[in-house]
């Protein structure tokens, strides 16, 4: 029996592959390599280059690899791109996910773990934000993911499939053993950008907006270390295997950090005082987005390692960025 990881050649899915292999599981990666990297998948994992929306291909791999659980990471994730190309996002993230779920049901796969996002909350009035509040995503990316949540909610009522939906907050850092990190060339994520500025791979950085209604005027986010996030997936898999029911959990630490605090931490850890410019607000950024994180701890028994350790997260990101830069020569 094996675990199918879609998007297993990417940043977060790649960390799932490592965790599964470390736990002695059989792993099959399905990835079209549109943003992932073949080198990111260790040789111990089976690899199929292809599209998770290709029904025939999915049916074949589910059968041939006797897939027991699907961890579905593959998606397009850039919010401004989703605004420019909504139909592309609804096709890739939503319509193709419907195909994957339908094939899972048809093949009798019992367990499904879905990568959702804090973007389903839009601009929540409360912070921290708990899972049961009214969901009102403000961009096509968030809506493309929320529709999959709805499909899964209806599917688990009608079929034997059980699903755990994990809503990620701001994922950061890298594998503590240095095997993998965020490798996308045109990253938009704050910690990655600040780290690139510290290493001189870009000319300083911009802070998007300093007039938000937050303590220092910059946006507040809940940064979760990537292997901690993956540990929640491993706990979700154990929950499903143990006969646990479908559920939806936020994945964050419940701790808000401002953009200025992140920039200060990157300067402190790197020892480099890189240039930081103040720029206009970025469209669609909520002022504060912090996870109400009780459910994942209580229902899945999740205990994160790096919740109080921003310097460790920054150190991992710096180490990975150096390796990546050397690899690219
Ligand atoms: N920021 C800067 N300068 C930069 C990059 C980011 O000031 O160069 C700021 C942003 O304006 C924001 C914060 O840093 O206030 C975090 O931005 P990121 O782009 O790192 O992350 P987001 O919070 O925008 O995005 C995350 C996920 C998305 C998800 C979204 C939900 O990466 O996938 O949360 O709101 F959709």
Image: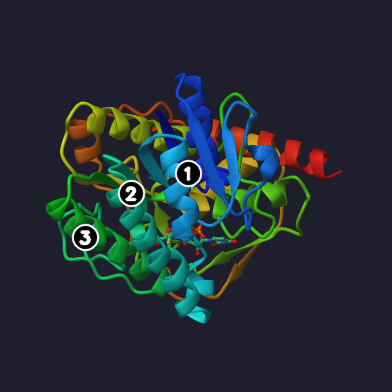
Q: Residues within 10 Å of mark 2 (few under 14, many from 20)?
A: many
Secondary structure of residue under mark 3: loop
Q: Identify which residue, 56 or 15, lies in the foreground.
A: 56
Task: Name the residue: 29% across, 66% down.
Answer: 147
SS assignment at label 2? helix
Q: Tell me the quarter of the image containing the C terminus.
A: top right
Residue at figure coordinates x 57%, y 47% from the top left: 10
Looking at the image, residue 9 lies above or below residue 21: below
Q: Position of residue 221 (x, y in %)?
A: 40, 53
- The residue positioned 52% from the left and 48% from the top of the image is 7
Relative to the observer, which residue lies in front, 325 or 125? 325
Q: Is residue 75 above or below residue 212?
A: above
The correct choice, above or below, for 197 with respect to 162 in the image is: below
SS at mark 1 in the image: helix
> Do tag 3 and tag 2 residues touch (Cβ < 8 Å)?
no
Give the image location of residue 149, x and y in percent.
Answer: 27, 59
Q: Which x, y percent locates residue 74?
A: 49, 53
Q: Which residue position holds label 1?
A: 61
Find the distance from the CA under tag 3 to the CA under tag 2. Answer: 36 Å
Name the side, left or right, on which 202 lies relative to 329.
left
100 or 255: nearer the viewer: 100
Bin the neighbour count of mark 3 within 10 Å (Cα to Cα): few under 14, some 14-19, many 20 and up.
few
- Closer mark to the observer between disc 3 and disc 2: 2
Q: Give the residue pinned by disc 3.
A: 126
Q: Residue at x 55, y 39 (%)?
A: 14
- Whether tag 1 and tag 2 are in contact, CB under 8 A, the answer is no
Residue 310 in view here:
no
Q: Which mark is residue 104?
A: 2
Disc 3 or 2, which lies upstream in sequence? 2
């Amino acid at each position: 029996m094996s675990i199918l990881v879609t998007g297993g050649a990417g940043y977060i899915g790649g960390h799932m592959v490592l965790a599964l292999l470390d736990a002695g599981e059989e792993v099959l990666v399905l990835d079209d390599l549109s943003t992932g990297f073949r080198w990111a998948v260790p040789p111990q994992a089976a690899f199929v280059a292809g599209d998770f929306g290709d029904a025939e291909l999915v049916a074949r791999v589910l059968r041939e690899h006797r897939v027991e659980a699907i961890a579905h990471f593959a998606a397009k994730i850039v919010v401004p791109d989703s605004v420019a190309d909504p139909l592309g996002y609804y096709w890739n993230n939503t319509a193709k996910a419907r195909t994957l779920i339908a094939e899972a049901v048809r093949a009798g796969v019992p367990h499904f773990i879905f990568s959702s996002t804090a973007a389903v909350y839009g601009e929540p009035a409360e912070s921290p934000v708990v899972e049961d509040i009214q969901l009102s995503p403000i961009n096509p990316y968030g809506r493309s993911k929320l529709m999959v949540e709805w499909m899964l909610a209806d599917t688990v009522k009608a079929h034997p499939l059980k699903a755990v939906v994990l809503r990620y907050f701001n994922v950061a850092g890298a594998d503590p053993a240095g095997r993998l990190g965020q490798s996308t060339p045109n990253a938009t994520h704050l910690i990655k950008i600040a780290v690139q500025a510290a290493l001189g791979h870009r000319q300083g950085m911009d802070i998007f907006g300093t007039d938000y209604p937050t303590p220092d005027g910059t946006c507040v986010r809940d940064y979760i270390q990537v292997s901690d996030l993956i540990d929640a997936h491993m706990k979700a898999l154990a929950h499903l295997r143990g006969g646990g029911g479908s559920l939806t959990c936020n994945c964050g630490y419940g701790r808000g950090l401002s953009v200025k605090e992140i920039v200060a931490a990157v300067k402190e850890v790197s020892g480099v005082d890189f240039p930081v410019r103040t720029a206009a607000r970025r469209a669609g950024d909520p002022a504060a987005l912090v996870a109400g994180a009780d459910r994942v701890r209580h229902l899945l028994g999740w205990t994160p390692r790096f919740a109080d350790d921003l310097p460790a997260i920054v150190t991992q990101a710096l180490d990975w960025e150096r390796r990546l830069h050397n690899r690219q020569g």
